Amino acid sequence: MRRWISRVLWGLTIPGAAIPAQAQIVMDMTPARIAEAIALGTSGEDGAYRMPGGVAVYFWTPFSRVTQLAWLASKRYEKIDPALMPGQTLAQEIRVFAEDAEDNEPDEMVVAIVLVPAGAKGREQAIQPTRTERTVGKDHDSGMIAYFYIEDWTEGAEVRVIQGNGDERKHRIRLKGVR
């Protein structure tokens, strides 16, 4: 009972009404939302959402990318100008990073990342990313970044990370607390 009351008080649910999961992700990065994200980043929030299970898989929304830029700038004692926010930071997309296995063997490297909607019955229903990039470097982890349309990112869907040997790592999307 207490849980239901707190949800109503916070305006998260109304008895008998369902709120779409996408409503939790900030879609419109207004100047006020940008300022909010910058404030979070300068207070120490890094902006990355880690997906549960196994090897590191992170994702970023437009809001969390602004938070991350502010966090990185604050670590360098720099200020971030909200008016000069790069367009790719505010893009209406979800970015997913999947880390390669530690030993970087070719058969354990990430070769694909797809999104499988909740309730999908076959591989043909998987959503391919709009684009992908490999990351390799001394200063950051090796892996793959995949970009998905923000409207495809829904509660209960799965991110599937496919390795060179054909193994799949499955990560269920949970949007609680995601902006």
Image (cartoon, rainbow, N blue to C red):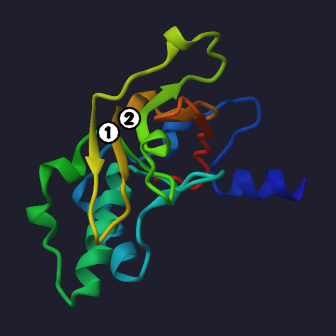
Whether residue 20 is visible to the viewer of this picture, yes or no, is no
Residue placed most toward the observer, 44 or 6: 44
Residue count near mark 1 (Cα–Cα under 10 Å), binned few <14, some 14–19, many ≥20: many
86 sits left or right of 105 in the view: left
Q: Residue at x 57, y 51 (%)?
A: 51
Q: Which residue is mark 2?
A: 150
Q: Check whether the beta carbons of the residues at disc 1 and disc 2 lie within 8 A of each other.
A: yes
Q: Amino acid at mark 2?
A: Ile
Residue placed most toward the observer, 4 or 95: 95
Real-space Cα separation, disc 1 to disc 2, in angstroms: 5 Å
174 sits left or right of 67 in the view: right
Quarter assignment of residue 15: top right
167 sits left or right of 148 in the view: right
Residue placed most toward the observer, 161 or 66: 161
Q: Is residue 161 above or below residue 98?
A: above
Whether residue 174 is visible to the viewer of this picture, yes or no, is yes
Secondary structure under tag 2 reads helix
Residue furthest right as drawn = 1
136 sits left or right of 142 in the view: left
Along the polypeptide, which appears first: circle 1 or circle 2? 1
Which label is found at residue 93?
A: 1
Which label is found at residue 11?
A: none
Q: Residue at x 36, y 74 (%)?
A: 41
Q: Residue at x 50, y 9 (%)?
A: 124
Q: Amino acid at mark 1?
A: Glu
